[in-house]
Amino acid sequence: MRAVENITSEELAELLDRTLPVETEPTVSLATCDRHGPHVRNVSLVRDRLSFYFATSRDSEKMGQLKEHGNVEFVAVLRGETKLGSLRVAGTLVEVAGAPLR
């Protein structure tokens, strides 16, 4: 296991390109929290180099939890040539306005 602090952003991007390709839009397990505790659900992830995005309704319970606490974490399964691994990413929500889904 290698911590992000031990590799450059270029090395991390190359690792992600091999194990979590941009074109795959994988399903990840997203964790949020409210006053009752943690909530985990699956969402589709979109990756742009070292940025991660997922879509949700602004009126959803998930978005309410994200707005209230601002912290988010997800786990993605990584598929390598010879074995499986996982990537755990924790950060702060930044809401990005986009086109409404139809």
Image (cartoon, helix red, strand yellow):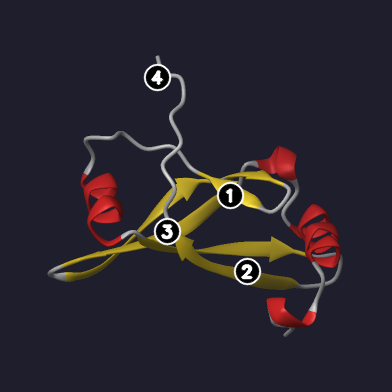
Crowding near pointer 2: few (<14 within 10 Å), some, many (20+)? Answer: few
Distance of label 4 from label 1 (alpha carbons): 19 Å
Distance of label 4 from label 3 (alpha carbons): 21 Å
Name the mark nearer the viewer: 2 or 1. Answer: 1
Q: Earlier in the sequence, mark 2 or mark 1?
A: 1
Q: Earlier in the sequence, mark 4 or mark 3?
A: 3
Distance of label 3 from label 2 (alpha carbons): 12 Å
Q: Which residue is mark 3?
A: 30
Q: Residue at x 73, y 48 (%)?
A: 49
Amino acid type assigned to the residue bearing label 4 in the image: Pro
Distance of label 1 from label 3 (alpha carbons): 12 Å
Residue 16 occupies which quadrant of the picture? bottom right
Q: Earlier in the sequence, mark 1 or mark 3?
A: 3
Amino acid type assigned to the residue bearing label 3 in the image: Leu
Q: Which residue is mark 1?
A: 52
Image height check: is 56 above or below 101? below
Image height check: is 80 above or below 64? below
Quick one: quadrant of the C terminus? top left
Amino acid type assigned to the residue bearing label 2 in the image: Leu
Image height check: is 7 above or below 16? below
Mark number displayed over residue 87: 2
Crowding near pointer 4: few (<14 within 10 Å), some, many (20+)? Answer: few
Q: Earlier in the sequence, mark 4 or mark 2?
A: 2
Q: Nearer the viewer, residue 85 or 9?
A: 9
Q: Which residue is mark 4?
A: 100
Q: Are marks 3 and 2 in contact (CB under 8 Å)?
A: no
